């Protein structure tokens, strides 16, 4: 009898355009990123593959560095998981890298931090090209007021005021390591935040509140008051999904320390 192959734990680095999908997590009546990936992996390995993602992304949200892992007994080389999967996957999903990791590695539970970015286009005329990848805002935004407000996010806080209404979670406390708002050429603005975890809708609710501050509807100091209230009705509306990107998932303590050291020196 042929020898039984030992299970291998494979880690994938994934980029995707979330426009056509109902988020990451597999669902019964809607197409998701997880379903498409698992279907392609099952075809490639001839096994029933269950993919573990680092976390969910909502419908319309994109990823530049989503991480997932799965176990398999196939003896396919690592190169096949990138090249082979990319031949099977649609054009809006790609495997950037594949790596064999320790059996105990878990894409979700091993994550130390995640980086999300939200992109806004602040100019008088909408963009047909970028409409699915940013929030278009034609009105003036006070960048100085937004940056002043962001300082309140750093540290450990209860983010109940910024989670999707109706969410049920035991511990809404999250630690924010870094947060920034940068303005680039041609009207582009980017909000980036690094934390040890995120509540559902948290980044989009933060962006909606920051935009209210930038438009003069709220004062910069209101952000700290909203945080302290733990009341979702006090925060601004959620920003549209298409401007949000999962940029990176951090698993190495040294990488996290470098990132936080860099943020504190800015």
Image: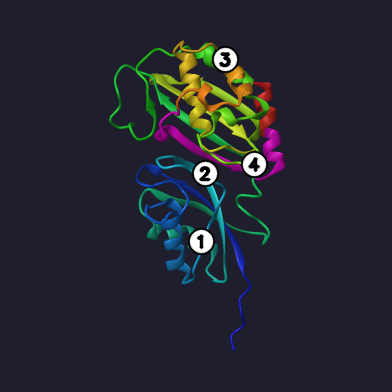
Kindly identify which numbered label has been placed on residue 65: 2
Residue 100 image point, x, y percent: 61, 60
Residue 192 image point, x, y percent: 54, 29
- State yes or no: discs 1 and 2 in contact (Cβ < 8 Å): no
Residue at 52% across / 31% down in the picture? 203
Image vertical order of residue 47 relative to residue 233, above or below? below
Circle 2 residues within 10 Å: few <14, some 14–19, many ≥20: many
Q: Can residue 191 be seen in this view?
A: no
The numbered mark, 3 or 1, whose residue comes first in the sequence reads 1
Name the residue beneath numbered marker 4: 170
The numbered mark, 4 or 3, whose residue comes first in the sequence reads 4
The numbered mark, 2 or 3, whose residue comes first in the sequence reads 2
Name the residue beneath numbered marker 3: 222
Q: Distance between the Cα atoms at labels 2 and 4?
A: 27 Å
Name the residue beneath numbered marker 1: 79
Circle 2: element type:
strand
Circle 4 residues within 10 Å: few <14, some 14–19, many ≥20: few
What span is colored magenta in the figure? 238-258
157 on left or right of 75: right
Q: Which of marks 4 and 3 is in front?
A: 4
Q: Distance between the Cα atoms at labels 1 and 2?
A: 18 Å
Q: Is residue 35 visible?
A: yes
Residue at 61% across / 66% down in the picture? 8
The numbered mark, 2 or 4, whose residue comes first in the sequence reads 2
Q: Does the magenta stretch include residue 110?
A: no
């Amino acid at each position: 009898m042929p020898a039984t192959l030992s299970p291998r734990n494979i880690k994938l680095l994934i980029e995707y355009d979330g426009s056509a999908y109902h988020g990451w997590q597999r669902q019964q009546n809607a197409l998701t990123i997880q379903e498409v990936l698992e279907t392609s992996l099952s075809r490639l390995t001839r096994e029933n593959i269950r993919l573990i993602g680092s976390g969910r992304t909502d419908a319309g949200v994109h990823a530049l560095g989503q991480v997932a892992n799965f176990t398999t007994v196939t003896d396919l080389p690592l190169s096949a998981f990138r090249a082979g999967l990319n031949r099977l996957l649609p054009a809006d999903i790609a495997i950037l890298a594949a790596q064999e990791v320790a059996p105990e590695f878990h894409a979700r539970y091993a994550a130390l931090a995640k980086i999300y970015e939200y992109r806004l286009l602040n100019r008088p005329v909408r963009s047909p090209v970028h409409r699915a990848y940013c929030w278009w805002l034609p009105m003036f935004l006070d960048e100085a007021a937004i940056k002043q407000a962001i300082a309140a996010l750093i540290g450990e806080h209860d983010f109940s005021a910024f989670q999707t209404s109706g969410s049920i979670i035991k511990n809404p406390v999250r630690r924010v390591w870094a947060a920034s708002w940068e303005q680039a050429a041609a009207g582009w603005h980017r909000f980036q935040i690094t934390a040890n975890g995120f509540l559902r809708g948290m980044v989009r609710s933060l962006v909606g509140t920051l935009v209210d501050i930038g438009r003069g509807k709220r004062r910069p100091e209101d952000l700290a008051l909203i945080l302290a209230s733990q009341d979702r009705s006090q925060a601004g509306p959620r920003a549209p999904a298409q401007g949000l990107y999962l940029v990176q998932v951090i698993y190495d303590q040294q990488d996290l320390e470098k990132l936080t050291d860099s943020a504190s020196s800015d």
